[in-house]
Image: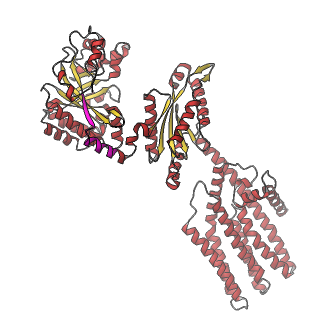
Amino acid sequence: MTILTAFSGALSRLHISLFNSDESCFARLRHFLEGDPLAFEACPLSPSVRGRFRAEQLTDLERGTPVILLVSCFSALTFLLLMWETPIAGQVGVWSALVFCLAGIVYARRVSAPVRQCSAASANGVWRATANAFLHGTLWGAFPAFFFADSALPQQLVIVGFVLSTMFGGGFALCMIPGALLAHVTPIWAGFAVALLGKHDPAFNVVGFTTALYSLVMVNGAFKRAAAAAQRCAAEAAAQEGALRDELTNLPNRVAFREELSRSFARLARRNECFAVMCFDLDGFKSVNDSMGHEAGDLVLIEAARRLKASTRENDLVARLGGDEFALIAADIHNVEDAATIAQRTLANFRPPFEVEGRSLPISMSIGVAIAPSDGVDAESIMRNADSAMYATKQSGRRGYTLFRDRFGFIAERNTLDAELDRAFAENELFMVYQPFVDSQSCETTGFEALLRWRHPARGVLSAAEIVPLFEREGQIERVGAWALREAMAEASGWPSHLRVAVNVSALQLRKPNFEAIVLDALNASGLDPSRLELELTETAMILDGEKAFDMLASLRQLGVTTALDDLGTGYSSLANLVGLPLDRLKIDRSFVANLETNPMCASVVKLTIELARSLSLSVTAEGVENPRQLGMLREFGCREVQGYLFSAPRPATRIAALFERCPLGGDAQTLPLQHVAKSCVLAG
């Protein structure tokens, strides 16, 4: 009864797989032979599930292949020895040789190109497995068809045993691939049936009929196992896809984006398929979150995701990286115009206001675009460059896009930057400008801060804020920093002896073991008194690699070189760090000074910083002083040194002689007209 039930089930499953579908019978048969889960009822259509299922099929087959090949060869050799003295020994030898050849070919192919455990496989592997199974089954189907009738009863029993063992051994190895199993079993059973029916022996007829029933049971089991495996792969793929999705917007998340970016670079290397990466940031999103709450912010993000998806092509990938940051991988980009078209279409889709909770919200988009491989040769570099271009859009007014090659194209490749710098040094494109430090009471100049500039032939004058981060990323900061130290000290050596020069030092410069030697060489070359040199360092530079940095700075301070902590309050400093750092001066960041008059909290921070510095025996300089009222407040707080456009903008070395004794700002700074201040801030040339 069980056998009949299995027989009926096998026929039913085969009928459903091939005929009970909207697809043609030939299409269903192709899916069946390819090991495609589309051949089974209610299986998903996802390509990733189909690839995952095939990979599992081939991995399972690989485990059983060596055993079935070994048994097949052993059976063929045994039968050849049994028939060695018979008239048909020659034919048996030819057949055995074919079995050995097929086993050798399959094994050699397996050794040269093993099926590795992977997440997806193509249909070609299943087609090869099915073809090999058919060839093997055909050889063993020919075995009883040619040799059963001419053999004695003992050899006939051996033939029956070998055929059955091969048939069911193949069922064990191919149980995950029903198509290959049918291709293997059908010729064997056909040859076996021809041999047994030709014998006209009732006992052998019973054997043949029973074998056919058990073959159908075996095929039915393979169908069930394959269908269960297909459904399990679908469930696993769905779970994995959920882990790669952003819950709010249903877009791919950061992990999925990184995986696709790796695949894009693989396609670039394999097929030279260029692509673009775009970073998106919503303008005005923070104000929505702050004023209307996070629920309204979530609605904005959902609508932004919808508009982004509508702006892209079918084979592009849009992902939410977190917060209001989105990113896009635009595939198959042939030129800059292709990427610009996508960016322009995105901006157009964001022009209509967002309708949230009955309010119209003007949400725009800032976009940065980088194209591989010219703007990045790996995932890290292209994301960094697209992000840099996006921030350039924000700095230039938002609501637009910036191509990395247009804004920062001259440093897109290391070799290009090297060549640009070689030319810059040869053509004197790098130069220093100097902004004075001023005594807040007497308005006398106490020194100058040296600031790096690059007069680029195509992009105009670039400030230190624009170029230093790029030099740091490209490993050129040591070369440029050493030049800046030498240039500033050489210039300062011709100033009056009471003026100091302050030079900014990068955190990467301070990490170099030869930094102290670079400073000493510049001092010796310029003849500048070490006490007139001040090194300005950021909080990050002072804190990173603490012991090495402290030892190096302590050694320089013994020579008389002073140190200043720049941009106080914008980094990671704490009171404990301030106490331990080898400092001579604190510089109050311009962001606090700019809000002195309007923000009591900023005024309190500045006042407390000045009192703290006094208690630690540190000097204080306030940056960014732009009007007499700020200067007056700093005087009241006891800040003795200031710096800012109220006194002078940064000037070339040829135009600072007039500032040596006294800045243009004279008399009572609190009553000086702002028109006079504006005139003193003009930088000619």
Residue 227's image quarter? bottom right
Residue 605: image x %, image y %? 33, 18
**Above or below 82: residue 530:** above
Q: In the drawing, does residue 147 fall left or right of residue 78?
A: right
Residue 120: image x %, image y %? 60, 54
**Quadrant location of the C terminus?**
top left
**Above or below 443: residue 56:** below
Does 422 lie within the magenta span? yes
Q: Is residue 619 visible?
A: no
Residue 95's image quarter? bottom right
**Quadrant location of the N terminus?**
bottom right
Q: How is the image coloured?
A: secondary structure
In the depicted view, which residue is nearer to us: 150 or 513?
A: 513
Residue drawn at the location 53% of the way across and 27% of the way down: 364
Q: Which residues are magenta?
A: 417-434
Residue drawn at the location 51% of the way across and 55% of the way down: 270
Q: Is residue 685 visible?
A: yes
Residue 507: image x %, image y %? 30, 37
Numbered disc total? 0
Residue 256: image x %, image y %? 55, 43
Q: In the drawing, does residue 123 fall left or right of residue 450?
A: right
